[in-house]
Structures are given as C-alpha cells and as structure tokens.
Amino acid sequence: MGAILSEPVVGPVAWSGREIKPDDSWVYRLSDADVRELESAIVASRAARPVVELIACADFPLPALARKLGQVGAALEGGRGLFWMRGFPVERWSEDDAARALWGIGTHLGSAIPQNARGDLVGHVRYEGLELSDPHARGYQTRAAQSLHVDRCDVVGLLCMKKAKSGGLSRVVSSTRVYNEMLARCPWHLGILYSPFAIDMRGEEDPGEPPVYYRPVFSYFDGRLSCGANRTYIRSGQERVGRPLNAAQAEALDAFYAICEEHTLSMDLEPGDLQFLNSYVTLHDRTEYVDYPEPERVRHMLRLWLATPNRRPLAPDFGTYDFAARRVVGIRA
C-alpha cells in the first residue's frame, strides 16, 4: 500500500450532482455545422476503411470539431472527469454510421481497447438474456440495476442509440468528492480502502489463470488520487478466493457507497447523447430497466473504452486486467 492522501482534493473534480446539475459547462450540443462535419468524416472513413475498427484519426478528419474534442479530453483528465455531447442524429444514421462516428471521435481522444474476453472494441450494450445471478454475467449484459463502479479503461464513452421503455437511467458520481467526504466524516475507513481487494473476473480469465485480479478502491500516486471501486465484483471476488469481506471491509465499503448516494448525478440519456467519463475520478451505474417488446426497439448503447495519452500516472498496486495483453497489470496476491 502506498501513501494515503490526508488532505481533501480541491478543484472541479470534486463535484456533487446537486451542485453541477444546473450548470451546462460540461454539456455540449452539436451544431448543424458539427453534424455536417461528422457526416463528411463518416463518408471519408468508409472510403478509406471498410472496417470500423481500422479507422485511424487521419481517416476521420474533423477540422473544426477536433478543437472541441481537445477541450473534452482536457476536461476529462484535468476537470470534472465527465462530459456530455448531445445531438448526434442517430435516428437517421445506420448502426455502422453511428459506430463510425463514435470510433472516429474516439481516435481524437485516444486509442480503443478491448472491453471483454471476446475482444469487442465497439461494445453493444443491450440485454443478452443473462441475469446477475449467473457468475459469468457482467452487468451490462442484464437488465438489472448496477452498483456504482468504474470500467477498466482510462475513459469510457457511451452513445445512446435507443432508450428503454422505462428505467435505464444513467447515474454518475465523483469518487473524489466521496473521498473528501470520507476524509471529513469517517477517515478511519480509508486505510482499508487503500488495501487491495479481489476483483471477480466473472469467468473471463484465461484457462488456468486466477479468477480474480487485485486493486484497491483508492490509490494516491504521484500527486493524483484514483479510484477503482466495484462493490459487486469485490464481494464476489473475495468469495471466489475464499476470503469473504470481513466486518471492517464491509463497513468501509458501505460507508463509501452511502456517501456516493448523497452526491450522485442522474442523466437521462436520450438517443443521440454521448457520455464520456474518466474512470479514475467517477463511478457510474444504470438503474434497472424494462425493454419494449419489439426487438428493433430494445435499449441499445454503443460503448468505447479508451486509453488516453494524457492519462494520470497510476501506482503499481492499482491492478487491472488487460484484455488485449490477456494478463493482469499490477500486483497479484
């Protein structure tokens, strides 16, 4: 375990949902000119690269919008850690067009990385007939409510294609604000949250590999505070290695998540909304949802996991699983 940060983090990264909800500085609505530029880039990329996942930044020229994306990247790493872009005309785009737009924008922010053992680079988040009771199911494959968590990437992008009939509300919280609150109200829990927990691989590990990897909830390294919380996978991960959460660990996680609920921001993503989140300073989840009965109307999101060039330095003990390398990066217990 490295150093423990004993002072609150100041700045826009430590936001609360009730404070920033009225503020639209983290929201950008595409102009007609932006949309025309995107559609021109979609056409250009199709001519250059028939396969979406082969599109490079040079294949997706955005002369004007690229400047805005530079600001988005800076805000994700050095600002609040979230950004909301609205107005993508997905109702008139094909799924391939929408995937090209998401991927192309991603090339201006970083490089896509695999999201699962299947190697998906453009993820399709929709019900796959699975339930969380399945030890090999991940939350996005179900309709169940999720626990606030981080994704295993620097930045996650989520483009709404279709909304659910009901539910499916996106929720985001600043893990930095939660840290500040814990430091002021229950600092005795933080030492536990700086220690590594077993994170369940949900059956996506290679044969013969451990069923978990290890990472702390909080890590302070080179002057930056990062968070790696996922209560659902922590609970099942600790059970899989035969070390269920003890009373002190459970109490610390309960305190963490209780404070999360006080500061969560709810976002009702509409078709054409694109949400970007920095995984080290925000947690996110989704409420339970009900789909329309027609297959063509089911809730559908396109997801991108990005490795970004301006990523903060991470401690060696801030372990994660790299699906591209097929190995754990960081410590193993």
Image (spheres, grey):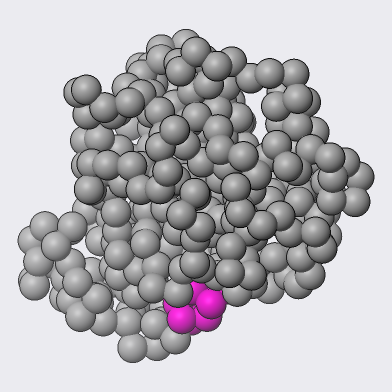
Question: Does 69 appear in magenta?
Answer: yes
**Magenta-drawn segment:** 68-75
Numbered disc total: 0
Residue at image point 55% right, 16% down: 243
The answer to which of 155 and 29 lies nearer the viewer is 155
In the rendered image, residue 220, in percent from the top left (x then y), is placed at 63, 58
> What secondary structure prevails in the magenta region?
helix
In the rendered image, residue 142, in percent from the top left (x then y), is placed at 44, 23
In the rendered image, residue 43, in percent from the top left (x then y), is placed at 18, 71
The answer to which of 184 and 261 lies nearer the viewer is 184
Image quadrant occupied by the C terminus: top left
Q: Is residue 125 left or right of residue 78?
A: left
Q: Is residue 223 left or right of residue 240?
A: right
Residue at image point 53% right, 53% down: 279
Residue 326 in view here: yes
Q: Quadrant of residue 217?
A: top right
Q: Is residue 115 left or right of residue 57?
A: right
Question: Does 166 appear in magenta?
Answer: no
Q: Is residue 202 above or below residue 153?
A: above
Residue 143 in view here: no
Residue at image point 75% right, 43% down: 190
The answer to which of 102 and 316 lies nearer the viewer is 316
Residue at image point 79% right, 70% down: 10
Q: Is residue 235 left or right of residue 180?
A: left
Q: Is residue 177 above or below residue 188?
A: below
In the rendered image, residue 113, in percent from the top left (x then y), is placed at 29, 54
Q: Quadrant of residue 100?
A: bottom left
Residue that extends furthest to the right in the rendered view of this protein: 185
